[in-house]
Amino acid sequence: MGKITVVGIGPGSLEDMTPRAKRAIEEAAVVAGYTTYIKLIKDLIGEREVIGTGMMQEIDRCRAALKEAMDGETVVVISSGDAGIYGM
C-alpha cells in the first residue's frame, strides 16, 4: 500500500506555502485536488499524475486518490489554507 498525505497550500502563493507542504507535493507521484487549487501550484507539479475534479466532486476525488494509494503510489491531496480546517 502507498501513502496519502493531505496538505494545505496556503492562500495561493508559492511563497506562502510551508516548506513541509511543498516537500510533500514534490515527493508525491500523484497530486489530487480541486482543479482551481491544482492550477495554483502547477509549477510544483511538473510531470506528476494529477487527479483534478471540480467543485462538489470531493467523493470522486477521494476515491481516485485512495485507489492510487492502494496501488502503491504516494499521493498528496491538496486543499487551500489549512488542511486541518479546509481539507475535505
Image (tube, rainbow, N blue to C red):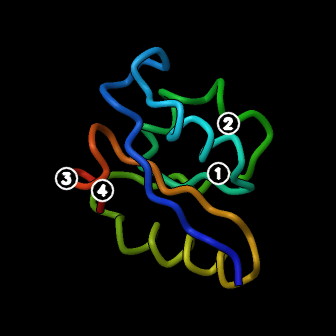
SS state under label 4: loop
Question: Which quadrant would the C terminus be assigned to in this image?
Answer: bottom left
The residue at the point 52 percent across, 61 percent down is 5
Q: Earlier in the sequence, mark 1 or mark 4?
A: 1
The residue tagged 3 is: 85
Relative depth, front residue between 33 and 70: 70
Q: Could you say which disc has been placed on residue 24 in the image?
A: none
Q: Name the amino acid type tagged 2.
A: Ile
The residue tagged 2 is: 45
What crowding class fits label 3: few (fewer than 14 Cα within 10 Å), some (14-19), or many (20 or more)?
Answer: few
Q: Residue furthest front?
A: 20
The residue tagged 1 is: 50
Q: Could you say which disc has been placed on residue 87 in the image?
A: 4
The Cα–Cα distance between marks 2 and 1, rounded to whole angstroms, is 8 Å
The Cα–Cα distance between marks 3 and 4, rounded to whole angstroms, is 6 Å
Front disc: 3 or 2: 3
Q: Earlier in the sequence, mark 3 or mark 2?
A: 2
SS state under label 3: helix
